[in-house]
Image: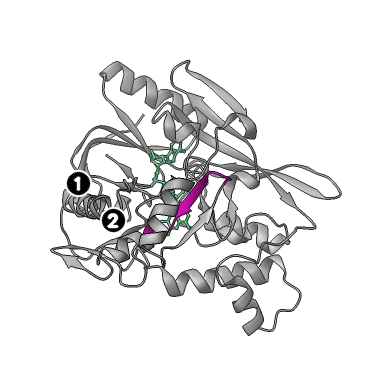
Amino acid sequence: METTQNISLQNLHSFGSNEKANYFAIIDSIEAIEKSIQWAKEKNTPYLILGSGTNILFTKTFEGLVLKMEILGIKKLKETASEVFLEVGAGENWHHFVIYCVQKGWGGVENLSLIPGTVGAAPIQNIGAYGVEAKDCIESVTAFDTHTAQFITLQNSECGFGYRTSLFKIEKSRYIISSVQFVLQKQPIFRTDYGAIKEVLHQKNNKQPSVEAISNAVIQIRSEKLPDPKKLGNAGSFFKNPTITKDFFEILIAKFPKMIAYPITDDTYKIAAGWLIEACGWKGIQKGNVGCYEKQSLVIVHYNNGPGIEIYNFSEEIIQSVLAKFEILLEREVVIY
Ligand SMILES: Cc1cc2nc3c(=O)[nH]c(=O)nc-3n(C[C@H](O)[C@H](O)[C@H](O)COP(=O)(O)OP(=O)(O)OC[C@H]3O[C@@H](n4cnc5c(N)ncnc54)[C@H](O)[C@@H]3O)c2cc1C
């Protein structure tokens, strides 16, 4: 296994802060996973799997081995009259995979167009956007279980998928995902009821939505709303939308009638974290190298070349001010190292 020492992580994650790692290696095969974990165990050093680094914040030097996932390949496993089953390497770019499906006319992932990152990271936090989550089209996930040193394939129901979470996120670093198996639909049922998708389709006179039309609409909406990490450091939504009880929701909505919330179950409500942050006056605020994005307050942006800890401290200030005003503790969606 080829390792590099004392490497800068600056170009390997979308916040672009200049932290370092003691060791770095590329994983481009199944065998490389086993070898590198063996290497880390022998050296008694921690390891971390890195995809495209678009959901991660480094706050200090990573005193261990960073393994960049680059296992590639899209393989058709089987096809029926209505469905197509694909196996995709963990290192494939997520958006490229979406476009591959869109070009074939296979439905399921079009609402998840333009989400940055790798296919292997998609199950980690069960990526989601515009009413669809990765779990809706994941059949199974193949991963190296570092506890047993065996490859396993977990069926969708065994992955513990939830809102921006999964077994893989909860048991941090235990599983190294090597490939994901997807099921795509040949006659998809479209989800156009979320965000501005319907509006954009209408503007473009797309009366009969198609996989391609929805993908294009999502790309247009996202490009207008979210900062491009190549131009402005960020990791998309920094916080999760919190869930609160119905009783607490009723107290809050009486005090803050404009609060954005929607019911999840008979007893729980999800609150728009962006609304809470904006109500605390953070939208568009910049402190030093870090700021709250002016078009979307859930996004923390990194303007210059500051250290990752500055971004973390800024997020902590937001958490504390939301806690003081609403008694709600925001949870970070971004993985902190
Ligand atoms: C502009 C922007 C918009 C975004 N929009 C969305 C959105 O709409 N919805 C959404 O859900 N997310 C969104 N995100 C977050 C991000 O794109 C996703 O979380 C994505 O899946 C991260 O992929 P990655 O390869 O960059 O993962 P990384 O950031 O490299 O890693 C994230 C975590 O997954 C682990 N990991 C990565 N690959 C593997 C693997 N193969 N095996 C085991 N562990 C692994 C890492 O160790 C880390 O803990 C956005 C980010 C940005 C910058």
Residue sitting at the far right: 81
Q: Secondary structure at mark 1?
A: loop
Q: Give x and y (percent) for residue 63.
A: 21, 32
Q: Quadrant of the N terminus?
A: top left
Disc ID at residue 158: none
Binning the other alpha carbons within 10 Å of mark 2 as few (below 14), some (14 to 19) or many (20 upward) gives many
For image coordinates 37% across by 49% down, the residue present is 55
Q: Please name the amino acid that badge 2 sits on.
A: Phe
Instruction: Pick whichever, 79 or 240, lies toward us.
Output: 240
Res 335 visible: yes
On residue 15, the disc is: 2
Between disc 1 and disc 2, the foreground one is: 2
- What amino acid type should be assigned to the residue bearing mark 1? Glu
Q: Does 260 sit above or below residue 123?
A: below
- SS for dot 2: loop
Q: Quadrant of residue 303?
A: bottom left
Residue at image coords 45%, 24% = 34
Residue 271 magenta-drawn?
yes
**Which range of residues does the magenta coloring cover?**
265-274
Magenta highlight on residue 46: no
Residue ID at (78%, 55%): 186
Q: Quadrant of the C terminus?
A: top left
Residue drawn 20% across the image and 55% down it: 314
Coordinates of residue 9 in the picture (x, y in percent): 25, 47
Depicted 137 relative to depicted 278: above or below: above
How far apart are the alpha carbons under marks 1 and 2? 11 Å
Q: Which residue is label 1 attached to?
A: 19
Closest to the observer, 164 or 60: 164
Q: Can the viewer see residue 298 in this picture? A: no
Residue 50 placement, left or right of 44: right
